[in-house]
Amino acid sequence: MGFFVFKTAQEISQHPRSHNARRERSLLRDWLLPVEGTVVLSIVLAFAWQKAVRAWPRVMVRAILWSSFGVTLAVGALLMCFSMLATVGLGVAMVVFSIGTGLYACWVTRRMGFTARVFERAVEPVEKFRGLNGPAYLMVAAGFAWISVWCVAVIGAVNFRFPGLTIFGLVVSLAWTAEVMRNVANLTASRVIALYYLRGMQSSVKFSFQRALSYNLGSACLGSLFVPTIEALRILARGLNLLEGEDEFMFSCAHCCLHVMNGIFSFGNSWAFVHIAAYGRGFVQASRSTWGQFEALPGMAALVDSDITSSVCFLTGVTSGALCVALAGSWAFATHRHYTATVSLLAFYVGYLMTRIGMALPQACVGCYYVCYAENPTSRLFDGTIPDRLNKMQEDRDPLVPTPRFPHQHGGGA
């Protein structure tokens, strides 16, 4: 990053009339401002989504799923109206994605009520800890500064050897860095909330944040690199496994791939961040311990596997990214239309990443709610939300066979 920023500054200052310097000045002038506007909009949207989910979870789960469908469809149509080959291609991709989102929203309709209750119960402890959202604010501010520097570095990479490969590396680097920022906020909130559930402690937010930036930073970096990859491959394997057909060989291969990814998932998953934060374990050890607890409690592994809270948080990022495309794409089309597709793609990417950082708090709360329940299901801090769901899942699986009821507390926090 520093090298490419230096190259940009060097080219502009030492050779101001060269072709490369003129090109870099044009890029700085024509597409840096729309991208910065996009970052500001994404920050506003990120904390608006977070506040809305915490305040009205029962309404927002359904609203997020369907607004993602509507917004991506509308923005896709807008991009196609620009009538340029690149923007039409992006618009078609967004329309196809919106159709998939709409089908997904129809498919998970029966889970929306439970998801809303989980959000409602999971975010309740946040009010007990003043400043718990502070690390997310700091990480978003750091993200704004980093993206600004990153944009200058990309301009320097345009005139470097192998620009396509270099820019691809910078894009991957930005995603990894943003994911680390999100997981630092995640680890801070997870430590505070998990120790409240498990020990009844009032932990210091400042100390938890310092710990996330020091002792737990290696696990945050490792998890940020591997968790998105593992979970994406696992989703792909599960999707292929659903495509039953007459080709027995292909079906066997898909089934084998699913078993392999399920095995890998137990060594690297997003639930690990709770034990990383609470107990200071390494990423792999924490992944195994959390998933082992889920498997030890009957039905719990299937319940967290069918959880859609992570999908809801993902779709807030997609919706914010689409809204950022509407802003930046229209801006670029009105001023320098030959940059419209590039600015639109970057706006979506940046809007998605910044929103995910802002949504770290509710996602951390949900993770703690599930993991801490699996560790101590008789705690008075948990009501009947999870036990009732486990019982319902068991009855739906085999309604003719009597099954043991999962106990839950009626006193205290119930």
Image (spheres, rainbow, N blue to C red):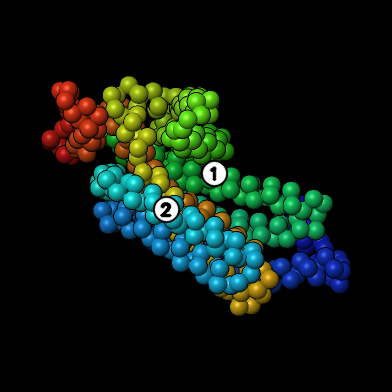
> Which quadrant holds residue 376?
top left
Q: Which mark is residue 101?
A: 2
Q: Amino acid at mark 1?
A: Val
Q: From what the image shows, is residue 177 above or below residue 277?
A: below
Q: Amino acid at mark 2?
A: Thr
Mark 2 nearby-residue class (10 Å; few <14, some 14–19, many ≥20): many
> Which quadrant holds residue 304?
top left
Residue 402 position, x and y percent, is 15, 23
Residue 67 position, x and y percent, is 38, 60
Q: In this view of the protein, which residue sits in the foreground, 123 or 236?
A: 236
The nearer-to-camera label among 2 and 1 is 2
Residue 35 position, x and y percent, is 59, 65
Image quadrant holding the C terminus, namely: top left
Q: Which mark is residue 327?
A: none
Q: From what the image shows, is residue 108 above or below residue 26?
A: above
Residue lying at 50% horizontally and 67% vertically, measured from the top left: 77
Residue lying at 33% horizontally and 58% vertically, measured from the top left: 63
Q: Secondary structure at mark 1?
A: helix
Mark 1 nearby-residue class (10 Å; few <14, some 14–19, many ≥20): many
Label whose residue precedes the other's in the sequence (2 or 1): 2
Q: Which mark is residue 180?
A: 1
Residue lying at 74% horizontally and 49% vertically, measured from the top left: 166
Distance from Cα at disc 2 to Cα at disc 1: 27 Å
Residue most extreme to the bottom: 334
Q: In this view of the protein, which residue sits in the foreground, 143 or 128?
A: 143
